[in-house]
Amino acid sequence: APFDWHNATVYFVLTDRFENGDPSNDQSYGRHKDGMAEIGTFHGGDLRGLTNKLDYLQQLGVNALWISAPFEQIHGWVGGGTKGDFPHYAYHGYYTQDWTNLDANMGNEADLRTLVDSAHQRGIRILFDVVMNHTGYATLADMQEYQFGALYLSGDEVKKTLGERWSDWKPAAGQTWHSFNDYINFSDKTGWDKWWGKNWIRTDIGDYDNPGFDDLTMSLAFLPDIKTESTTASGLPVFYKNKTDTHAKVIEGFTPRDYLTHWLSQWVRDYGIDGFRVDTAKHVELPAWQQLKTEASAALREWKKANPDKALDDKPFWMTGEAWGHGVMQSDYYRHGFDAMINFDYQEQAAKAV
């Protein structure tokens, strides 16, 4: 039977925790193992590892592979767990720092092209997990590398307390992995203006606009909330000035939403990504999702036209969303670009049936 998204067998992989195809990228950006339970560290899974397992996935009957967001994440860690008893890195792909780059832990662009092409040769579609609601937390590693934020330490105190490379800091006796926050001056306006900039995010840091209390403007888990509703041309995130490897370019008149949909659609145009699984859908305005769907759909049509030998068929771009608590119902999401929504009711029903 021809492929149909209605009865696709979708396999989700959290890429970092699946298969390590290239051990040389395991400690990218100076990331470390923690020497403990390794709960929140990168484990080494990557795009090359996924390619190595495609035959296995094909044998399982998988015809769509949903992978955790492969984009560049915050480089450092934050305190993990309520007690801060381990360092928590963005191994899961939900703390994006640059939507135009792959995270070095995942591999390079050649690895991605090989994965997508090899999957398509086996009749397997590729879905990216994508986030437009929030960015990642501020980490010592990124503060040092991109020169934003502010410390309570000065002069020799900095090196004495944080070391040559701030991301190497470890808690001393009586401290936890949350304790690094004690050294950071979160109210220094000048230093924090050099981070994303007020046009991009709302957060309780510096003199940024404060997050709201509704689904659309809240700070989810204290993560900086992207101003996806903004109609003001934003320029690029301020710290990108110090980020020489970004592929982001200023586009006249673009808002944060415009940049995000443009950057995400570019992956579709360049590689033939078949669909997106959208994270935190209820925390972003519906028109933003319609814009993403429209742009990504056009991008996939362009890719298929340019690569007739690689295109599996002429099926349009597909999009599913995660809106916490959504059940089996035709909601507004379906009128704003979504072809399907994750069914959270099923979880409860399945548990009751056990």
Image (spheres, rainbow, N blue to C red):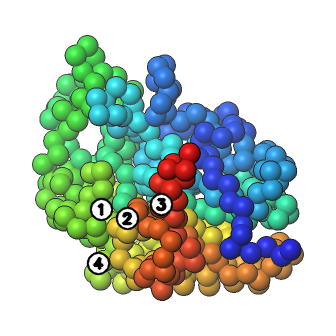
Contact, CB < 8 Å: mark 1 with mark 2?
A: yes
**Dot 2 amino acid type:** Asn
Nearest to N terminus: mark 1 or mark 2: 2
Image height check: is 188 above or below 336? above
Mark 3 or 1: the one toward you: 3
Dot 1 or dot 4: first in sequence order is: 1
Q: Which quadrant of the structure image shows residue 307?
A: bottom right
Residue 127 can be seen, yes or no: yes
Gap in angstroms between the C-alphas marked 3 and 1: 24 Å
Q: CA distance from mark 3 to mark 2?
A: 20 Å
Q: Which comes sooner in the sequence, label 3 or label 1?
A: 1
| Residue 301 x %, y % | 69, 83
Real-space Cα distance between discs 1 and 4?
A: 12 Å
Q: Which mark is residue 230?
A: 4
Residue 168 image offset from top left, x and y in percent: 39, 27
Q: Secondary structure at mark 4?
A: loop
The crowding category of the residue bearing disc 3, from other C-alpha atoms within 10 Å (few below 14, some 14 to 19, many at least 20), is some
Using residue 285 as the reference point, say whether residue 352 is left or right of it.
Answer: right
For disc 3, the marked residue is: 344
| Residue 225 disc label | 1
Tag of residue 133? 2
